[in-house]
Amino acid sequence: MIGQQPSGQIGPLAIALIAGGILAWAAVLAILLVVLLWADGRVVLAGWIDGCQLNLPYYGRLSGEAAIAKFIDKLAMLAFAIVPVLMLETAVCGYRGGSLWRLTQGRSPSAIHDLIVYALNFAGLWKYLSILLSFGAVLAVGLVAGGIIQAFVQFDLRIRTGSLILDTALGFLLFTFCDYWNHRLQHRQPLWPLHRVHHAADEMTVLTLWRAHPTISAVEPLFKLWPLAVFDVPAETVAVIAMMTVTYVHLIHSNLRWDWGWFGRWVLIPPIGHRLHHHIDPENQSKNLGIPVIWDRLFGTWDGRHPPDDRLGISDMPYNRSMPREIWRDLVDFLRESWRFVTRQ
Ligand SMILES: [Zn+2]
Ligand SMILES: [Zn+2]
């Protein structure tokens, strides 16, 4: 029909942009591969440690590389995780059905929120918001967590089974165990006001992963950095696991509705499982909190159902209107709930 917008149609400009994007991505990938081979994956680890606001003299050899590491880490994440997931999603769901359209042409307030948070992270500015809105607690937590890890390293308290594969597997299990409880506690007061914004996305984009409250960075290292202290896993291995995990967490925020069959029931929470976790019904938001299925099954939060409908987000709180106001409101709510939590004890 004349005048009707053909949905999902890709014009010549879009094709040229996509082709250019793929070429640029291939070039970045080639450069990164060379850098990663040269640096044995240590740069990724250095970037990761920096992301957790840690300063670890143990990784002294890395400190000189820290500045470049930060940038390489962001590029590596883009090249190995975000772009491949976007391409896969576009191939399976179509341009109109995936994140690319939502982030470029759809531009709903929710998708724009995702994009802004990611851009601030990429530009290195999110970190300063975290410092400011946690009143410096992010830095203090980094120092404490860094000190604990160093003590483990210095007094040689780390576990070594003698097998790299076993060390890595145990390290992964401990990491995901900590991650599970970190996430589960974020669904309870007083932490819920700081996690709520992640659930406030009313549609999924691959970048929804990045939606977070700046202040949450003051809490997460306390939960998540133990594996680094407890198991003696080499930097290269941590880097590989970190990259695989990063790809996975972007994938489960895509519009792919895969349930992965038995693999999704027994090994890793599939994209549809995380979609259920983002469903608007608070009952569903308490399900599928982990990365491997084992922790949800063990602690009674696993749910293999598909979401009943497509409604995502938070029902009892306005979001995606003014980001600064919502960030401030959530911080005040968190402080109020923390005060209640402490005085009730
Ligand atoms: Zn959650
Ligand atoms: Zn999520």
Image: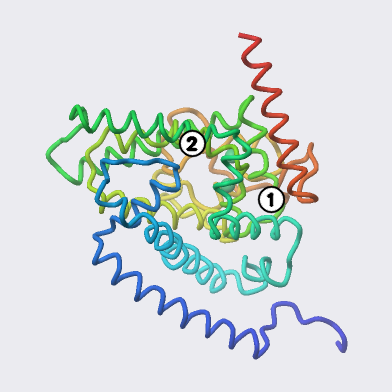
Which residue position is annotated with label 2?
A: 139
Q: Quadrant holding ligand 1?
A: top right
The location of residue 311, given as percent across then percent down, is: 73, 50
Residue type at mark 2? Leu
Q: Is residue 210 above or below residue 162?
A: below
* Residue name at image x 64 percent, y 21 percent: 338
Q: Who is closer to the viewer here, 9 or 21? A: 21
Question: Which image quarter is the C terminus in?
Answer: top right
Q: Who is closer to the viewer here, 37 or 245? A: 37
Which residue position is annotated with label 1?
A: 201
Circle 1/circle 2 CB separation < 8 Å: no
Q: Is residue 121 above or below residue 94?
A: above
* Residue name at image x 60 percent, y 31 percent: 187
Label 1, residues with CA under 10 Å away: few <14, some 14-19, many ≥20? many
Element at label 1: loop
The location of residue 56, given as percent across then percent down, is: 32, 41
Mark 1 close to ligand 2, CB under 8 Å: yes
Q: Who is closer to the viewer here, 202 or 39? A: 39
